Amino acid sequence: MSKDFAFKELDVEGMQTLEAIAAASQFNEWMYKTTAKNLKGRILEIGSGIGNISAFYLRDKRALHLSDIRDNYCEFLQEQFGAAESLEGIVNLDLVDPDFDRKYAAHFESFDGLFALNVVEHIEDDQLAIANAKKLLKKGGRMVILVPAFQALYNHFDTALEHYRRYNKKRLARLFEVNGLQIERKTYFNLVGIAGWFFSGTILKKRVIPSGQMKLYNALVPIFKIVDRVAFNQWGLSVIVEGTKV
């Protein structure tokens, strides 16, 4: 599926989605605990947005460097977390900047861990994105990537949020393999989320996640966590792959 998304300095749909998810504290903590458990030392978050996941790292006083491609998000992060004890810095970071090696050389091989949650699907050249992210890791550093799962679920939400694609474990793992990262973990996440995504984005053709729906979902997270365990994480709205720089 060919797409041509022009970069928007102010991403209205993206901001509305982040704000709706911001109110879902149980869901955000579930995502944090699922993706953060194997990250140690100095950590870089790529695509911090408004800090929905950043807040948990900083709450737990984990050494964290924030980044985003948009200046307004970087400014928001500074206002929100600038005084946090374990915050190491905030940088405007574009993973596929043509001048990446010069602009970000000071950050090369700086981090023990790196994560990007719901970021890579926004990047047309996803292979280059992973290659450049790898440069930021120390040898032995761990990379965690979470992206939307299953192309069959691509709908109005994906178009509004400018997703180039959705993934499965094999497709995401391939990005790690071609970039020489040793895969440590592959799993799906948030099985029940598929129903809400399909109903609102495919049947109702909405472009932004309804805040009321997100609040209801958040209240039921304890049940949905059990569903994921019972299903052995074999399906989900998102897919996660973790790998090590060797």
Image: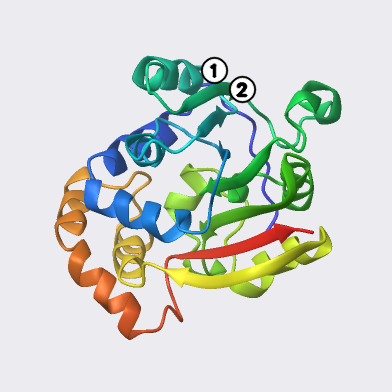
Labels 2 and 1: the sequence-earlier one: 1
Task: Check residue 211 in the rendering and tell me which mark sits there, or answer none.
Answer: none
Residue at 54%, 22% in the rendered image: 90
Question: Would you say 155 lies left or right of 105 here?
Answer: left
The residue closer to the viewer here, 106 or 30, is 106
Quadrant (top left, top right, bottom left, bottom right) of the C terminus = bottom right
Q: Local crowd at mark 2 within 10 Å, few (<14), some, or many (≥20)?
A: some
Q: Are marks 2 and 1 in contact (CB under 8 Å)?
A: yes
Residue 152 image position (x, y, % from top left): 52, 71
The residue closer to the viewer here, 200 or 118, is 118
> Disc 1 residue type?
Asp
Which of labels 2 and 1 is toward the front? Answer: 2
Residue 92 image position (x, y, % from top left): 61, 22
Quadrant (top left, top right, bottom left, bottom right) of the N terminus = bottom right
Q: Local crowd at mark 1 within 10 Å, few (<14), some, or many (≥20)?
A: some
Residue 177 image position (x, y, % from top left): 78, 66
Task: Tell me the quarter of the picture where residue 106 sits.
Answer: top right
Q: How many marks?
A: 2
Residue at 83%, 63% in the rendered image: 178
> Disc 2 residue type?
Asn
Depicted 60 relative to depicted 30: above or below: above
Depicted 188 relative to depicted 82: above or below: below
Q: In the rendered image, which residue does mark 1 sit on?
A: 71
Question: Would you say 109 lies left or right of 144 here?
Answer: right
Task: Tell me the quarter of the picture where residue 109 sits.
Answer: top right
Residue at 62%, 49% in the rendered image: 120
Judged from the image, the secondary structure of the residue bearing numbered disc 2 is strand
Q: In the rendered image, which residue does mark 2 sit on?
A: 92
Question: Would you say 233 lies left or right of 206 here?
Answer: right
Judged from the image, the secondary structure of the residue bearing numbered disc 1 is helix
